[in-house]
Amino acid sequence: MQELYETVSRYAGRGTSSHSTGRILPRRAAVQFVGSFVCQGRLNSFCAALVARYMASNEALVVVSRDAVQTVLCDGYSLQPGRTELGPTSGEITDVVASAGSVTVGYSAGVTRYSSRLQLQRELLFDGYSNSILSIAVPPDGSCIATGGGNAVVTVWSPEMSNVMHYLSGHTDWVRFVKFTKGTDQRLQLFSTGDDGLILHWDPLAGLLLSRLDSSHGESVRAFEVSWRTGLMAIACDS
């Protein structure tokens, strides 16, 4: 990440003095500016696409490592590191999701929620290895929070994380992925999967199991993504 800061900032000073700082770049300008780094071999295309999209929006960029959470500030053509929050003293950060103006971080000992400026809002600590949080999901409207972990249970929390709305049982091993989607009928839905290879489809607000799919035939799921808009899934297993 430091190399990304330096690359963008170094080239930002070349021929950009006519552009005022503190403004969101027009999308075309951001794409051209960052795209030039790809042509020069300074950035790979994936990183460049993320940076260009961020610089052409008013969204906050959050970067996470195993032991810290950091915001990235965009000032005109320049990227600068913002506030940094260190992770827990025991365990490591396992997942993060930004939605509805907040950042929710999961780690082996619990869940922490920050504002978009990384001001602490809520912290939940768990006892015991079996409760390790491995995955977190928050829908765009922030209506609830879902977590999965080492106890093979999907937990649906209230928006403020003040109470548990539902414990969703059905997995037999670690739950490594939880993903929200609105589906074709526009109703909030939740998918979960992990080491048991099962993909479970839930109504998170009612706490009901809607369907079950064993697409990996018992193999652990290593990567899993669901489109928020369409509900289309991408799955990767060992074989």
Image: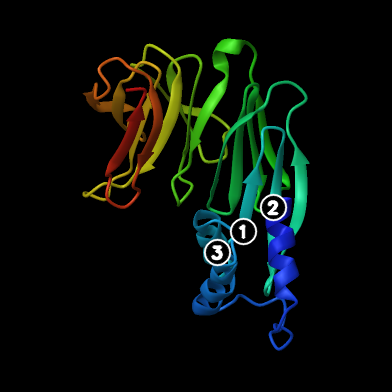
> Which is nearer the N-term, disc 1 or disc 2?
1
Q: Residues within 10 Å of mark 3 (few under 14, many from 20)?
A: some
Query: Circle 3 sits on which residue?
Result: 38
Q: Nearer the viewer, mark 3 or mark 1?
A: 3
Mark identifier at residue 133: none
Q: Is residue 65 above or below residue 70?
A: above
Image mark count: 3
Query: Circle 2 sits on which residue?
Result: 71
What type is the residue that disc 3 sits on?
A: Val
Residue at the image position 65 percent from the left and 21 percent from the top: 109
Q: Is residue 21 above or below residue 106?
A: below
The foreground one among 98 and 8 is 8
What type is the residue that disc 1 sits on?
A: Ala
Dividing the picture into quadrants, the one containing residue 72 is bottom right
What type is the residue that disc 2 sits on?
A: Thr
Residues at circles 3 and 1 in contact by the CB criterion of under 8 Å: no
Q: Residues within 10 Å of mark 1 (few under 14, many from 20)?
A: some
The C terminus: image quadrant: top left
Q: Residues within 10 Å of mark 2 (few under 14, many from 20)?
A: some
Residues at circles 1 and 2 in contact by the CB criterion of under 8 Å: yes
> Which is nearer the N-term, disc 3 or disc 2?
3
Mark identifier at residue 60: 1
Residues at circles 3 and 2 in contact by the CB criterion of under 8 Å: no
> Which is nearer the N-term, disc 3 or disc 1?
3
- Left/right placement of residue 89 relative to residue 176 reads right
